[in-house]
Amino acid sequence: MARKKRVIAYLTANFFKLMYRNPLVILFLLIVVGGGYAYEVQIARPAQIFKGVPVAEQWQYPFRWFRVFRNAHFMLGYSDVRGNPLWVTYQLKAVDKNATKHKRPSNFKSDWRSLNQVKATDYKGSGYDRGHMAPNYAISRLYGKQAQLNSFLMSNISPQKPKLNQKLWQRLEEVEVKYFTQLEGKLWVVTGPVFDADIQRLKNAWNVEIPDAFFKMYILERDDNTPLTLAFLMPQNVKGNEPLNRYLVSIDEIEKQTGLDFFSELPDELEDRLEASITPKAWKLKKVANTKSRY
C-alpha cells in the first residue's frame, strides 16, 4: 500500500510539473475534454433519444437526480440514490427472421459507472426478479452481442415481481417488437420505474429501492411530423393475464408520477396535445391486448 501511494504521489507531482512547464498541454486537454463533452451532448445523445433527454422537475430533490449512461443502442438515466434507472430509451424495428440468436448471458454485471455498485446477488432471496428495462430479446436480435451484454448491466435492471416481469411485462415486450414495429414510422420506447413516498428497499441491499409500478411509452415518429404516442402504467401486483389496455394512461400522468418532463424539445402545443392523448385505436391495441405470455 505504501509503495502504491508513493507511485501515485510521484505521478501526480510530475503531472503538475508538466502542466507548469507546458501550459499549452493544459489548453490541449481543455479542448479535448470540451470537444468530447460537446460531442456527447450535442450529437451522441440526441441520436439515441426522441426529442431530448428527460428533465427532472424540482431538480433539488435528490431522488430525481440521474446521470446519463449511453450504451450500445440504448441510453438511460441512472439514479445512484435509488439504485435504479429512472428512465431507459431505445429504438425498435422489426426483427429480421435471419437475425443472429445470441445466447443469453449467464450472469448480470455491476456497471462500473455507477457509484453504488449494485450486484446481481443483491436480489437473491428478495422475492423480486431482475427486470430488464431495455429488453434482452429485442436488443440482442436487433443490435448484436455487445448491446445484449450492456442490457445485462445492473444499471438497466429494476426489481420486478415475478408475475409482472415474466407475464404482463413480457407480453408487452412481445407486442412492441412483433406488432408495434409493423406500424409506419420510427418507433421509440421510453420506460422506467415509478416510486411513491413510502420507500422500500431490497432486504439484502439498502442501496436498491423497490418501485411501486413501471411505465412504458411508445412514440411513432412519422414522415408527416405528426407523431403517435401510447403509454402504459403497470403496478407491481398483477396476475399477469390482464388485458394490456387496462393499464393505458396519458404521458401527462406518467410525468406527474415520475417528476420527469419528457420530450421537452417538441413544440409546446404539440407536446401538450400528445401527452394528454390516449389513442389505442391508432396502435391497433385491441387486437393484441390479450396476447398470451410465453411463461
Image (cartoon, rainbow, N blue to C red):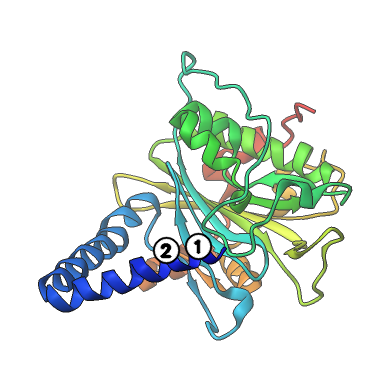
The quadrant of the image that shows the C terminus is top right
- In the image, taking residue 186 as reference, residue 160 lies left or right, namely right
- Callout 2 environment at 10 Å: few (<14), some (14 to 19), or many (20+)? few
Q: Which residue is mark 1?
A: 3
Locate residue 247, reporting x and y percent.
72, 53
- Callout 1 environment at 10 Å: few (<14), some (14 to 19), or many (20+)? few
- The structure residue drawn at horizontal position 60% and vertical position 50%, both measured from the top left corner, is 156
**Element assignment for label 2:** helix
- The structure residue drawn at horizontal position 17% and vertical position 79%, both measured from the top left corner, is 20
Question: Separation of disc 2 and disc 1 at Cα?
Answer: 6 Å
Q: Taking the image as drawn, is residue 88 in sight?
A: yes
The quadrant of the image that shows the N terminus is bottom right
Q: Taking the image as drawn, is residue 275 in sight?
A: no
Res 7 label: 2
Which amino acid is tagged 2?
A: Val
Res 25 label: none
Foreground residue among 154 and 136: 154
Dividing the picture into quadrants, the one containing residue 136 is: top right
Foreground residue among 144 and 282: 144
Locate residue 246, reporting x and y percent.
75, 50
Pointers 2 and 1 in contact (C-beta within 8 Å): yes
Dividing the picture into quadrants, the one containing residue 137 is: top right
Foreground residue among 239 and 282: 239
- In the image, taking residue 60 as reference, residue 186 lies left or right, namely left
Foreground residue among 272 and 294: 294
Q: Is residue 132 above or below residue 100?
A: below
**Element assignment for label 1:** helix
